[in-house]
Image: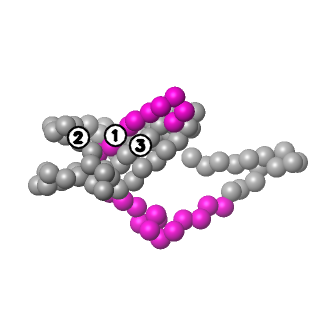
Amino acid sequence: MQNQQPNQQGSQRKIQIKVSDDVLKGAYANAMQVLHTKEEFILDFMNLSPHQSVGIINSRVIMSPGHFKRVILALQDNLKKYESGFGKIEEAEAPSNELGFKAN
């Protein structure tokens, strides 16, 4: 999602985005949990290994309900474009174990 804000003359201006090398390389996630309150949605992305009893949350994203809805619409749009170009994606099987959280 690209965000462009009109300037005082009404034209669009580009927003420059900085990204560190650590963020740019990304983090693998094979599971996600969504929590919410009235004011925000919390998305925990995690890496679960079938050979270990401990998974790791490697990223937490917190956003407003309005922005969360825009993210869902953007994801649906991109999924539709992907499947029209590469074919239908089969949904992955959900983890069979219940997730429990432990703070460090």
In terms of sequence position, does the residue under pointer 3 or pointer 2 come before the other? 3
In-image side of 28 versus 72 (left or right):
left
**Residue sitting at x 27%, y 48%:** 102
In terms of sequence position, does the residue under pointer 1 or pointer 2 come before the other? 1
Q: Could you tell me the amino acid type at mark 1?
A: Gln
| Structural crowding at the residue carrying mark 1, measured as other residues with C-alpha within 10 Å and reported as few (<14), some (14–19) or many (≥20) | few
Give SS at disc 1: strand
Tag 1–tag 2 contact (CB < 8 Å): yes
Q: Which residue is mark 3?
A: 43
Q: Position of residue 89 (x, y in %)?
A: 29, 40
Which colouring convention does the figure follow? one colour
Q: Name the quarter where the C terminus is drawn.
A: bottom left
| Structural crowding at the residue carrying mark 2, measured as other residues with C-alpha within 10 Å and reported as few (<14), some (14–19) or many (≥20) | few
| Cα–Cα span, label 1 and label 3 | 6 Å
Kindly tell me whether residue 42 is visible in this rendering: yes
Q: Nearer the viewer, mark 1 or mark 2?
A: 2
Q: Position of residue 100 (x, y in %)?
A: 23, 42
| Cα–Cα span, label 3 and label 2 | 14 Å
Q: Which residue is mark 2?
A: 99
Kindly tell me whether residue 74 is visible in this rendering: no
Q: How many marks are shown on the rendered structure?
A: 3
**Residue sitting at x 33%, y 43%:** 32
Please give the range of residues in magenta: 16-40
Q: Which residue is mark 1?
A: 33
**Residue sitting at x 16%, y 39%:** 97
* Residue closer to the observer: 65 or 3: 65
Q: Is residue 38 above or below residue 42?
A: above
Give SS at disc 3: strand
Give SS at disc 2: loop
